[in-house]
Image (spheres, coloured by chain):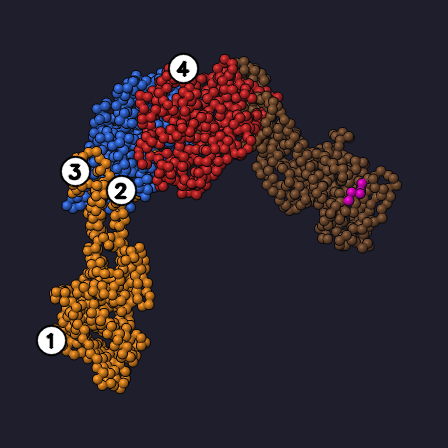
Chain colours: A brown, B orange, C red, D blue
Amino acid sequence: MEFSAVPKLCLHLISSAYQRCRLSGQICRLAVILTHSSSSHSSLRISISDTGIGCCLEEFQDLWFSSTDVADNWGIRDTEIHSYQINLKGSGSSRITRLPSNTKNGANFSGSEVYLSSFVSLDILLADIHTFMQKMQILKIPNVAIQLVAEDCDVPESRYEKVFLANECKQLPMSASNLELLKSGIEDYVVKHGNNLSTKEQLKVGTACCTNNRLHTELVMEAVLHFKDFSPSTISRSSVKVLQSIDWKTYGLNLRGIVEQDGVTLLEWENLPKDIHIDMTTIPAPRKMPPLYRNLVKKAVKLSLDDLKANHSQAFLSSRALQIRGYAPDLAKTIAGLILSSSDLDFQGECLSLLGLQFQEVGTEIVESCIEERIVSVIEMNDKKPQNSQQVAPFLFEELEDPVQETEFQENDFSPLDF
Amino acid sequence: MEFSAVPKLCLHLISSAYQRCRLSGQICRLAVILTHSSSSHSSLRISISDTGIGCCLEEFQDLWFSSTDVADNWGIRDTEIHSYQINLKGSGSSRITRLPSNTKNGANFSGSEVYLSSFVSLDILLADIHTFMQKMQILKIPNVAIQLVAEDCDVPESRYEKVFLANECKQLPMSASNLELLKSGIEDYVVKHGNNLSTKEQLKVGTACCTNNRLHTELVMEAVLHFKDFSPSTISRSSVKVLQSIDWKTYGLNLRGIVEQDGVTLLEWENLPKDIHIDMTTIPAPRKMPPLYRNLVKKAVKLSLDDLKANHSQAFLSSRALQIRGYAPDLAKTIAGLILSSSDLDFQGECLSLLGLQFQEVGTEIVESCIEERIVSVIEMNDKKPQNSQQVAPFLFEELEDPVQETEFQENDFSPLDF
Amino acid sequence: MEGKRTRFPSESQPQSVILLAKIKEFTRALLADLTNGRSPLILIYRFRSYCAVPNANCFCASDLPSGKEVLTLRRKSHAHRLVVMLRVMLVVQKLLQENKHSSKRDIYYTYPSLFLDQSVVDQAINDICILMQCSRHNLNVVSAGKGLIMGWIRFSEGERIFDCISSPNTAHLVPVHVEEVQDWGETLPNLCIDIISVARYILVVEKESETYLLGLSLILCILYTKRFLRLLVENLRLPVYCLVDCDPHGFDILTTYRFGSMQMAYDTKHLRVPDIHWLGAFPSDSERYFVPNQCLLPLTAEVLLIFLLDKRKVEAMLLRCYLQREVPQWRLELKLMLQKGVKFEIEALSVHALSFLSESYIPSKIESEVSRR
Amino acid sequence: MEDLQNLTLNFFSDQELCNADIVPPSQVRARIEVSVLNFLKILNASNPAISDLPLIQRKYSNSRVNHGLLTELSRVFLSNSVSTRSLMRPNAAKAFVRVWKVMEMCYQILLQEKRVTQRELFYKLLCGSPHLFPSQTHVNRTIQDLVALLRCSRYSLGIMASSRGLIAGRLTLQEPGNDIVDCSLCGSSGYAISGDLNLLEKLVLNSDARYVIIVEKHAIFQRLSEDRFFHQIPSILITAKGYPDMATRFLLYRINRAFPDLPVLALMDWNPAGLAILCTFKFGSVGMGLEAYRYACNVKWLGIRGHDLPLLPDQSFVPLKPKDLQIAQSLISSGILQDNYKDEVALMVQSGRRAEIEALYFHGYDYLGKYIAKKIVQSDYV
Ligand SMILES: [Mg+2]
Ligand SMILES: [Mg+2]
């Protein structure tokens, strides 16, 4: 393995450990200990341990090999603390060694520890990890305490130690869910680092929590601005496939393509207004996904998009609805015409009162805009409902006793006499 | 030179000599003397002499070399009898040797003699020449006496001598021109050797005599059947070009191509009725022609075709006129219809009398055919006139005093400004 | 179901008042849905005059709807149709209120960039008719097509008297407001029928020509006169004959007169003339009357595409269920047209003599029709 | 006024005007007979020939525009440039024979006192000489040739020309020996103008109208006559349902001559075709051949014109089609348009849009009448 890859691997391991802590829901500790010693066979020993939900061997194998399945035998119900060593010089499955586990003695937590050794420079690695942990603070997870320790055994008094705690979440109630915390953190982050957004109100964030019992875990999906600053890694090909399989048009979006550039994955949108940036993250963001897992991610993404749309329907109208909404002014004008051109004053009055308008104040434009508003809102409402779950409304203007089966006319022939 | 070429050369030289005699208009003698002698350096000595209009060196050079110009210094005005020897083994200009000329002592004739020697068989050559001279009788030229002498010096009493005289032209007056004689001869020949023609009447012959003063000679052109039997040689490339440059369509003919086959040149015609054969000859038929000479041949061919057409317009209508004549039945039928369907007896009477028909004898078909006949005759008459000299036909109505005439009518003329 | 298709209201109110009320009701219901945040759903029945299963046990003759369509605001195509339908309804409301008449083309030209295409307007008019359970003329939408009449008839529309008898060679325009003729006929029935009785039959022809009519007692109608023809038939009770080109188009005209069109299937009962007889030109006439070969156009006009179109049209028509069920002999003739692969126009019959149609063809055909019955 | 018109007419006819007349059948027959006799005479002369047929050219190059000096009347007419049909040119021989064929057919039709449609004529000719008349267009063109040769109208040749024209309003018509037709009582469909020019020529006209209004479209005509607009503004309404046919133009011409004081106003779509239709009423067209010029009429343009556009809703405009631009081009290049018409065409091209008269219905069905009335009262026509 190249030297440059070691920091990446470390960040990934830290990220995974952090996820395990976050998902446990308990108060957890994540410790990263870097020890440099010129006497040992590798110059730098890296230990990443956590008291989260526990992990399994296959999780690490995925880092290099295509795995057929992720074993589901890990979690807080395990009785032991697993311990692994990664041998960077090894090859194949021999790279990862399962060290003897320590029993938890019935305690209600799980835990993992990963060791690895490398010749990478302590200072550089420490700086990378430090930055990464600061970024992780965005997640605002209060139950995880992160401890970063670095020591050069050859240099006395060189021990560095820092504890990261989510201390900015005072505005949120202690009972806030992970999801809410994450949302708040991301909002803070975007506002802090963000673009032209001056207020938090303009920021639209959709979240969704989607559980799959078979995996004994939950996936959280957020749609936020400036995803690329957050993620230390590019999106895996599986994730790209998931993103491509989503029907963006339902949300008025048009994914042109996914481009990888300088290690950063960019989603390119068509016809997106200039002042809008859309990026997203899934947490956890696995590198390779079995089909089941993939469906879960997709579901999470869709749910959070639905969440976004539910709260900001105007901005995320499907392109279908957008097209239909294009007819609203004409439709409103026509209906207003039907009302106002009627010679029946009673009828006019009735219609206006339905619209909540007074007879006196009626100008054509007012009636039109009033109707248009309502048509638009019906269209937007229609759009929020999933396509297939549309309930059958009563037919307009029809007393239907014996519904006849709908048939398709293929022959649309005009008779010569239908002039 | 190959042996097989020697008879051809001889026939050509005889032909040329015969032309010189014919053109002189005087009584002439053409002598061909073949002498075989094993003692001499060549086994057969051939002498061709004539008292015709005289020849020049260049005439013979043309047999092998491209000549730039034919010298025009020969003719009956020469004071000497030229004598040449052709050396078949020589090469270049050394082949032909000018022998000393004999003076004519003021006699009013010219003459040439050509000698050559070859190893060719006397018997074979004699047979060839004999046949050829019989063919030449076709020309019926009364002023040329041909003497053919053959003798093997090694064999006593072997002398063969024959005199050919045009003795079949008794029907023609003595004053008949060469052209008339030639025509008559060709007619006789074709009738004798010809195809399905049973009577001379079906034979159509056109002749033209066309002089060019610069050449001090005349060209005669005949259009006859079975040209290929007559000409001992293929047509030269220059002649082919001349033939191709003629606008055959003016005579209702369509030259598909000129094919050389077994030493015989065939003209291939398109859409020629089965019972018609068209071939032609020009006399003299030079092998290579300078441009001036070529024009003369072309003019002669055209003139004789015109002559043919003048006498047999039905058969040589131009394709243009043929096309137009195709409309004659329709037109005649229409006009007859107009006349006969009229209820106005005066009008009918007037029309019929114009046609020279009696009122009583009138049947539809008679009127139709009468009109058609006249229309056809106008068309044929028109066709005989050269294209450029056709006068403008009168208008149906003359009351237009000063019409601004636009003669070009396109079938697909359409009128714009119909917005 | 019968109630759905009543044209003439049982109430004494004029049709226009009823229709206006229906339009208002429709508007009100639409508005109520919108203000309640409901998406409006509009149910439109579909009718058809035939199906493409000749031997099926179908109900195409029964005047029952054969299906339905539901328009909502959820589909783009529906949204456009809805806009067009409402805009046309707005036009109709104006027409009815002002007691004016208008043609389909008129309506289209008023908002061409909204409607995009004439056919959309036509569909909207049909939809409204189905929705409002009325005929097209009830909407005060009249046909602008040309209908001509000549022969032994005299009638009036409003103040205008159509006197075809006194100028027998002139084609008169068929009145636009057929209803008025009928109303007038109902109030003064004697006058109308008395004068008309000169004629012995009605001949419907595809195109205008004087060569049909010398010396015959007949009334002649030309195209786009379905309602007027129906009215004549109802009032005069004369036999009706149809003379059309021997081509797919002509046959289509014939079947439309007899069975109604698919487009207006919802109103077929009131437009079709079930007793119309096909007088010609039959595919078999080309031999019987010695039509010259050059006057027989192959079902092609040289271009392969047109050939296929014609052929395909005939093949599709052969499948129409009513042919097998009601006029199998027509179907045989149509099959013959396909077999022979040629078509010809009425004019081809008169190439031998200008008065052939009027002097021999039509009389002999009518005679054979009469004797057949 | 009429004298002046006659004067200019004569002036031009002396000079270079060619025309086709409405001629009774007997005279057409006589002309045909003269043609046959001349043909035979020339065929039989001492210097026999097949006479060429001198046809007045129906091409743009032979058209002239006459802007009246003494009257406001302008017209398009054909000069006496001749296009010959000669048997002796192979590419023209067919056309030559066709003329005679059609002449024969017309002669027989006239003898039988029948009238045929062009389609019927086509079939008769197709039957007799399929190689000469492969299509209807050949027949149509040859009929024009025959008109140009015999100088008589198509109708005179026994060819039925059904008119699409309608008339309504304050006008009574009387055919000799028939009842008077009151065009104000003809209902919304109006009185159908007969295609028989002979009959139209004989009509006795009477009117108390103040205006003649030409309407481009049938539907607009129906609307106005249904509304009895002609009582609102005493007027005569005419439509040809698009480009005018001969009969409609002839009747308009007759009305114009009978009541020369009535202004003739035109209500057209705002597009190049609308103006072209107006121009055809006003000047005639080359395509009408020899029959065209004489029925020129001083038509004024009432609407829809550029300054009316603010009255129209946006949705009534559609983009100009290539065909529109083509028409605009030929209008401008025809040299016939007065300046304010040219400006109007330029405006259409520049705006790239077109609108139909129906767009006025946006303001209600009564609006059309009000619009016309207002324009008439304000003399808002050019
Ligand atoms: Mg047809
Ligand atoms: Mg228009």
The residue that disc 1 covers is: B106
Farthest residue to the front: give it.
C371
In this rendering, which labeled residue sits more in front, label 4 or label 2? 4
Density class for disc 1 (Cα within 10 Å; few <14, some 14-19, many ≥20) is: few
- Label count reads 4
Decide which of D280, A218 is in the foreground and name it.
Answer: D280
Q: Are marks 3 and 1 in contact (CB under 8 Å)?
A: no
Write down the chain letter for disc 4: C
Q: Determine the chain carrying the residue at label 3.
A: B
* Both marks 3 and 4 on one chain: no
Residue drawn at x 40%, y 22% is C238
Q: Nearer the viewer, residue B353 or D246?
A: B353
Amino acid beneath label 2? Val
Residue of label 3: B350
x 28%, y 77%: residue: B124
Give the percent coordinates (x, y) of residue A375: 58, 25
Q: Is mark 4 within 8 Å of ligand 1?
A: no
Q: Secondary structure at mark 1?
A: loop
Marks 3, 1: nearer the viewer: 3
- Separation of residues labelled 3 and 4 (CA atoms): 62 Å
User: Circle 4 is placed at which residue position?
Assistant: C189
Q: Amino acid at mark 1?
A: Gly
Task: Please say if B246 is above or below C302.
Answer: below
Closest to the camera, between mark 2 and mark 3, is 3
Q: Are marks 2 and 3 on the same chain?
A: no
Residue D194 lies within the magenta run:
no
Amino acid at pointer 3? Glu
Q: Secondary structure at mark 2?
A: helix
Dot 2 crowding, Cα within 10 Å, few <14, some 14–19, many 20+: many
Label 4: element kind: helix
